[in-house]
Structure formats: C-alpha cells, structure tokens
Amino acid sequence: MMLFRFTYLSLVLVASIDAHTLYSECSFEDYYIGLPTDISTWTRAVLGPFLKSTHRNFLPYTHSSKEDVWDALKDLDTCDGVGDTVHLIYKDTCILADETQGATTGWNREHIWPKSLGVGTDGADMTDVHHLRPADWNVNAARGNKYFGDCGIARAASECDSPAHAEAAPSTAEDPSIWRAPTKMRGDIA
C-alpha cells in the first residue's frame, strides 16, 4: 500500500509540472523560423528542403582532413564528459581516444546492426552515428554478427558463457548466436 501511495504521489507531481517550464530554452518559433506559420501546411515538400538545409547528409566514415565518424564518436561517447576519452560499449570502460583509435590494441567503430547483416559499405547507413559506438577491438571481433538477447532462450543455458569475452564487461554473455550487452548499456543498444 505504501508503494502505491508513493507511486501515485510521484505521478501526480510529474503530471503537474508545466511543460513550458521544462522546455523554456526551446523556442518553437526560433527553431522553425523560415517555415510557414500554419503547421497544417507543412507537407513533405515543405519540410524536406528545411531538413536538408539544417542537417548534414552524412559524415564520411574516415577522412584525413575533415570531420568524420571518428570525430563524432569522440564527441558523443566521452566518459562522463571527460574530453579525450571514449566509453567502450561492450567492455564498459573508458580509454584515451586519440592514442588508441583504430589500433588493434585500442578501439574501433562498432556497427550496432552488423554490416554483414545488411549495412551498406558507403553512404548514410555506413556512417549513421546513431548506430555506431566505440568498442574494444577484440571484444567487437568476438561479438561478430550475433544478435542481441539473453542466453539460454533459443539454445541451452549450458551453452552460455559469461563474460562474453575475456576483455568484456562481467555482465556480458554469449552463446553461439546471441550476445548480451553489459547491464548499463541494455536499452541503449538491445
């Protein structure tokens, strides 16, 4: 009964927060400046050019003189906001980004949906930073193209190994077809 009261009280408090207060730094008018003021006229033909003009088409996977996916991952996956570091998704640890980038003893770019299961080798699907994460080179290779999930469901639990690799986070696991992500990454990637 106490849990119910606490949950109900929490929901009432959250529901009573004014949305304007939560988003006071976001101005609808400023963000959509240049579009017709009547939202009912926003069609694909109207929104398409707006989105193309305000967003990049795609980052290069690797480029020597301009910003690429490596740079984006260093910005997006820093360890608790500490510059020059990246969080390795399956190892669940942080390392210096620049010193180990692309090295077999360092980190590489993990395609959350494996390239061998249908990602192209160029263009936006190859460089979509929503589905790329820094990963320890060896642990990433061990994951291969296994699907995310829990061991012991499709196959016998006796086939499940934990951790999934000697260098992986302790909460990972694998069987011949499944890879279980570290606890704190579940929901982000699986």
Image (tube, helix red, strand yellow):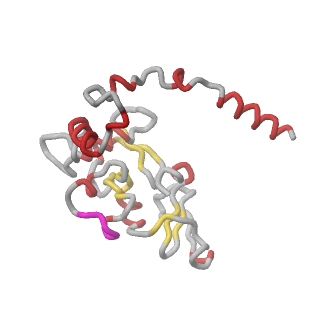
Q: Position of residue 142 (x, y in %)?
A: 41, 67
Q: Position of residue 115 (x, y in %)?
A: 31, 65
Q: Position of residue 119 (x, y in %)?
A: 29, 64
Q: Work out which residue is located at the far right of the displayed protein and give it.
A: 1
Locate residue 156: give its quadrant: bottom right
Between 109 and 45, the one nearer to me in the picture:
45
Above or below for 156 versus 73: below
Above or below for 124 versus 121: above
In the picture, measured across the screen, residue 127 lies left or right of residue 172, that is left
Q: Position of residue 110 (x, y in %)?
A: 35, 56
Locate residue 30: give its quadrant: top left
Please tell me which residue is depicted at 46% across the width and 68% down the height of the picture.
147
Q: Which image quarter holds the N terminus?
A: top right
Above or below for 149 versus 14: below
In the picture, measured across the screen, residue 13 lies left or right of residue 18, that is right
Above or below for 187 versus 98: below
Between 45 and 13, the one nearer to me in the picture:
45
In the picture, measured across the screen, residue 131 lies left or right of residue 5, that is left
Between 102 and 67, the one nearer to me in the picture:
67
Number of dots carrying numbers: 0
- Residue range highlighted in magenta: 116-120
Within the magenta stretch, is there residue 117? yes
Please tell me which residue is depicted at 26% across the width and 52% down the height of the picture.
127
- Secondary structure, magenta segment, majority class: loop
In the picture, measured across the screen, residue 126 lies left or right of residue 20, that is left
Within the magenta stretch, is there residue 65? no
Please tell me which residue is depicted at 69% across the width and 28% down the height of the picture.
13
Between 129 and 14, the one nearer to me in the picture:
14
Please tell me which residue is depicted at 13% across the width and 45% down the height of the picture.
64
